[in-house]
Image: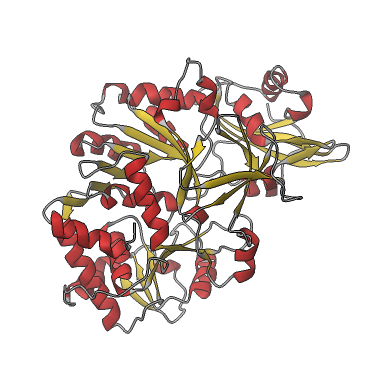
């Protein structure tokens, strides 16, 4: 398996040019058309003076131009950077100073986020198409290597300044292998892509069907009504959502009567899911489900819970609390982060992976790269987990999120899983807050279901019936929503920075 992202579009355009490649807002682009468009963009980049290795930024909502640019950068040897348009101008400025792009493609509403950093800006809605179509559609045939960086995604920066994760053609090759071997994508698949393309759950997953010659249905945002309309309209077979989106879908009016029978597989990940929500989703959609665990630094999924391991009510029902097993081409280990030694089976250790899916490194940050990927090639994820005798992995938490209360380790995910069992709870996040006696104590931040009544005392009592008391919340605060990143992850750092009242809320 030795191909580049550019080879993918060349191959499918040569063998089935009239087959649908991408549909967006009523327009369908064939593989032949995508090949021609991306060649025009590649030649426009070269005509603008860009050289191999130069960076091209796209700052816009989901749209076909992202795919055109991704294939064009592969054909020209440049590097595509998809930026999070939800960031503040200050945050975007920090990233642009680090990336030093030669060209920026920006949506009209996102252009105001850009500082005047000297890079040329092409506005997507008014100038991009004319700029693209003025170039020839002859493939520039850049002689790239599979280890070349083809894309960069910046980490959210929740633990510090954002870092540019360098993703190579080889990284994406293994994603294509996963699409075929693990999730069953084929030329007949129709893949719904609604997650933002500046996230690995958008960029990586967004290439799954396309890599096999299948049809990608792109939405601008993961909103319930367009998703539920697109599934029967395009006969969608595969989809990926974060738990918050799944929650909105199963709560959509009339969802139980909708014609969703084309769905074959729904993949979920990027954040913990409650067992209650998962069972409800399995009942609503009636398709197979698969959990995906991965990082931007692993170019996507490296551990997955297969559909056959979703066994509610069966002898392996407990596996629903796991994220599954490592992929065949991923070396997986749990290590004590202090000693560097593997931990015994069943004990908690840091997840480390070694695979061709691991990033090339962080852009312009050799020290951070060396800290993340050791001399033996192991990526240190910072995630705490245990593994059972059958190889199933159970995420406990981020090591940085672990609470140490009276010398006892408390893993917030374990507490959250119990809180989610309360019928009034819609969402929760558990954090540690300073405590004079114990060093830290447990606080639960909770969003209740619409119309539900729940007091702090009731929830604390509920937890104490199910957990050791040192693991239970000593305080509870109720919010209408939890702060989240663009990928759907709860931002616990923001919760820790809040000025919490000393007393519980009712």
Tell me the quarter of the picture where residue 139 sits. Answer: bottom left
Foreground pick, 486 / 179: 179
Residue at x 31% of width, y 22% of height: 256
Q: Does the image show residue 344?
A: yes
Total number of numbered labels? 0
- The quadrant the C terminus occupies is top right
- Residue 281, compared with residue 326, is above or below; it is above
Residue at x 71% of width, y 16% of height: 465
- The quadrant the N terminus occupies is bottom left
Foreground pick, 308 / 81: 308
- Residue 17, compared with residue 185, is above or below; it is below
Q: Does the image show residue 197?
A: no
Residue at x 32% of width, y 52% of height: 207
Q: Residue furthest left?
A: 18
- Residue 209, compared with residue 321, is above or below; it is below
x then y, percent, for residue 496? 69, 46
Tell me the quarter of the picture where residue 288 sits. Answer: top left
- The answer to whether residue 179 is left or right of residue 272 is left
x then y, percent, for residue 372? 62, 59
x then y, percent, for residue 29? 17, 55
x then y, percent, for residue 97? 52, 75
């Amino acid at each position: 398996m030795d191909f580049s992202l550019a080879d993918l579009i060349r191959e499918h355009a040569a063998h089935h040019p009239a087959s649908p490649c991408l549909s967006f807002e009523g327009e369908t682009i064939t593989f032949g058309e995508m090949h021609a468009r991306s060649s025009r963009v590649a030649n426009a980049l070269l005509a603008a003076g860009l050289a191999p290795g130069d960076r091209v930024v796209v700052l816009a909502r989901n749209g076909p131009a992202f795919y055109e640019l991704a294939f064009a950068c592969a054909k020209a040897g440049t590097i595509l950077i998809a930026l999070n348009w939800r960031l503040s101008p200050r945050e975007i400025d920090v990233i642009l100073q680090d990336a030093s792009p030669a060209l920026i493609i920006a949506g009209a509403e996102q252009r105001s986020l850009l500082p005047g950093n000297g890079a040329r800006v092409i506005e997507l809605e008014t100038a991009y198409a004319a700029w693209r179509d003025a170039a020839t559609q002859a493939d520039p045939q850049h002689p790239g290597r599979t280890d070349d960086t083809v894309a960069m995604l910046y980490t959210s920066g929740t633990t510090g300044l954002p870092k540019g994760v360098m993703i190579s053609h080889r990284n994406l090759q293994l994603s294509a292998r996963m699409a075929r071997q693990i999730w069953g994508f084929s030329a007949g698949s129709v893949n719904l892509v609604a997650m933002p393309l500046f996230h690995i759950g958008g960029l990586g997953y967004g290439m799954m069907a396309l890599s096999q010659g299948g049809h990608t249905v792109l939405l601008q945002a993961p909103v319930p009504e367009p998703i539920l309309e697109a599934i029967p309209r395009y006969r969608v077979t595969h989809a990926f959502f974060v738990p918050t989106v799944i929650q909105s879908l199963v709560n959509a009016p009339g969802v139980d009567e909708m014609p969703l029978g084309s769905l074959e597989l729904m993949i979920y990940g990027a954040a913990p899911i409650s067992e209650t929500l998962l069972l409800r989703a399995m009942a609503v959609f009636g398709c197979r489900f698969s959990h995906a665990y991965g990082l931007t630094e692993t170019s996507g999924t490296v551990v997955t819970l297969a559909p056959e391991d979703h066994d509610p009510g069966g002898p392996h029902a407990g596996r629903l609390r796991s994220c599954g097993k490592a992929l065949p081409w991923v070396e997986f280990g749990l290590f004590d982060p202090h000693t560097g030694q593997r931990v015994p089976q069943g004990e908690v250790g840091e997840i480390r992976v070694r695979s061709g899916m691991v990033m090339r490194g962080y852009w312009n940050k050799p020290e951070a790269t060396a800290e993340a990927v050791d001399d033996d090639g192991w990526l240190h994820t910072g995630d705490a987990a245990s593994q059972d005798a059958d190889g199933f992995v159970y995420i406990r938490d981020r090591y940085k999120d672990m609470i140490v209360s009276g010398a006892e380790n408390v893993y917030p995910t374990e507490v959250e899983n119990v809180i989610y069992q309360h019928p009034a709870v819609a969402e929760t996040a558990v954090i540690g807050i300073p405590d004079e006696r114990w060093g830290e104590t447990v606080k639960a931040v909770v969003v209740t279901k619409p119309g539900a009544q729940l007091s702090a005392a009731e929830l604390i009592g509920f937890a104490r019936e199910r957990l050791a008391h040192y693991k239970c919340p000593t305080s509870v605060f109720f919010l209408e929503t939890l702060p989240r990143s663009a990928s759907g992850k709860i931002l616990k750092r923001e919760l820790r920075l809040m000025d919490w009242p000393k007393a519980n809320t009712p």
